[in-house]
Image (cartoon, rainbow, N blue to C red):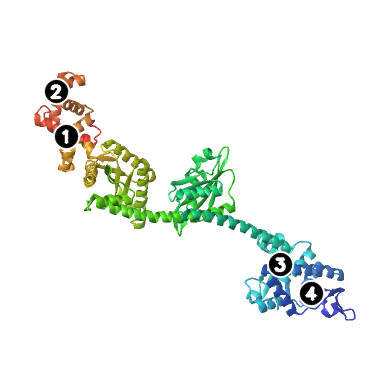
Amino acid sequence: MRVSELRLGELLEFLPEQGKILLKGSRVMIFDAASLGMLRKDLINTLGMDRAKGFLIRYGWSCGFQAYTSIKKQFQWDEDQEGIFTGPIIHTLEGFALNEFFCNTDQQTGATYYKGHWTNSYEAEQHILHFGQHHEPVCWNSVGYASGYSSARTGKQVIYKEVECVGQGDKQCTYVGKTLEDWGEEIIPELAYYEVSKISEVLEAAHLRIKTQNRILERTVTIHEQLTQCILKGKGIEDITASLAKLMKCIVILEDNHLVLQSNCFPKQSITQDLLTSYLPILTSPCFNKASAFYLKQKRPFQITDQYEDFKVCRLVSPILVGSELLGFVSLLRRDLPFSELENIDLEHAASVFALVILEQKKIAEVERRLKGDFIDDLLSENFSDPNSIINRARRLNYDITLPHRVLVLDIQNFTLLIKSFNQNEERILQFKTDLVNTVQSSLERLGKGMVVNKSDNLIMLVQLEKPDCPEKTTRQLAEEIIKQVSIRFPKITLSIGIGSSCQVLGDFRHSLLSAKKALEIGKTLKKQSQVISLEQFGTHALLFNALDPQDLYHFATNQIGSLLAYDKTYQTQLMPTLQEFLSHRGNVEGTARTMNMSISGLKYRLQRIEEITGQDPKDGQAYFNLHLAVNILQLVGEDKIKF
């Protein structure tokens, strides 16, 4: 019998006396579509949509595979084409749907594939009846039937996929069938539905996942509770860092948003402390430095592993974020052993605790800066009626203003260019000033004791002295070290510091501020090369600089001996050193000649040339005074041809 001659009445044999119905010798049963729809509903409600889909696909596969096996025994086909089309016809005769089936060839690969349509699919009707439209095709039993039948016929694994479905709102149900090889990666998500999974195994796996999640939750809650207790007890960053190191059993590092190390702690009895100490800052990581721009944008924890000659350094880093604001980074560090996903979760929770502490510290610091600013304003402007009131205000800030001090003024020489680089962004400018104050304060605390506030474009520093007669040189060294440390943190800024006079009583602070500002003014006017300037370094000449315009003094000096400096430079002569030596010997020709190891006549010749070039006779009393003053002024300016 040919496939086109198949008639359901001829295939079925009813045996009511035996309670059987046979389809070409194989027992079959007739089911009501509504009953199958209820079965489908119960499966979905009991197992869930995905597991029910897998169940019905595998059931359909078995039906289709068995159908081909039975039909092949009953029919003798003249050619393979009969077997190809028999399956869809049987599927239609059994009432699943009207099955229109086509065998096609891929023009590019030459591979055979199958395509067709199901009209009036009972599965689509029943699914819509009980669940409404779905977001994906729902003719799962038919897909399984077609896959099982074709796989049995070809001896290869053939998978059908529904690409359109009435159950998801399409006009018709359309399917495509290909061998597993021809599908490629596209079919991989569907393959899981063809694999049998025992519900007991699934439940056991779910139970294990729940137990694992409970362990994670318990550990995370424990860490969070202990770190939170540190906050409630008023403990600071160092204590929280130490607690986390104890809980995580590895090194903990805290860095600010500029990657400056703020705190670190090793677990007790750490055998790797000496080995890993030099690797604490994240900037020591070669992997981080290669892709720092990428890592700095991360919003979740990330792991970095650096391979060295004999060992690996494993680092787990979590950004500390409040909204989009980056406050810093907290890292875990250890040797050789990578960090687990559980440790990743723990560190992320710890980062949220650090965020709370850092935010609190920032608020306290802002209030403290405002109080310090108001205090220093009143102190330096002498805006207090009773000395005890300003002294008590200082004590409330944990500061002793009765000790000897100097006032220092830090000036950013390229501040205007810096502002332009921030594109006039007020928020960025304010943040820069805050970071600068914090950096200077940290440097000052490491080097001595004092207070720093931001005033306009300058920073005002109160620096405590070790003793009342502490020399200017000590404060100068401190100022130079502050500039050095700040320049490391902010390499693009150019700084200078003016040192004020010593303060022994409260009334001295205003004078110290004014002298520090005057020193900076003189340094700018005279283009002094030194970054640290004080009036004391000018000695008695400071009186002149205070009384007169420093620019006028500079012009006076260059008018007196500028031509002599130019002559020496052009002709490589030594007239300027000769004049300096003559002036240092108070105009004594014999003493000057002896010191310079030259003849008196030779010295007189040089003095004559000096007179011709400058228009002044060094041996004349007024000319001697003018030349001596000019040399001293240019020495203070730092002219490289004028030596002290």
Res. 187 image quadrant: bottom right
Q: CA distance from mark 1 to mark 2?
A: 19 Å
Q: Is disc 4 placed on a helix, strand or loop?
A: helix
Left or right of 485, for residue 289? right
Q: Earlier in the sequence, mark 3 or mark 2?
A: 3
Instruction: Identify whether 126 is placed above or below 537.
Output: below
Q: CA distance from mark 2 to mark 4?
A: 133 Å
| Closer to the eye: label 4 or 3 | 3
Mark 4 lies on residue: 90
Percent x, y for residue 358?
43, 54
What number is the disc on residue 588?
A: 2
**Do residues under tags 4 and 3 come within 8 Å of each other at their CB atoms?**
no
Closer to us: 95 or 285: 285
Q: Is disc 2 placed on a helix, strand or loop?
A: loop
What number is the disc on residue 54?
A: 3
Res. 422 image quadrant: bottom left
Mark 1 lies on residue: 630
Instruction: Identify whether 59 is placed above or below 432.
Output: below
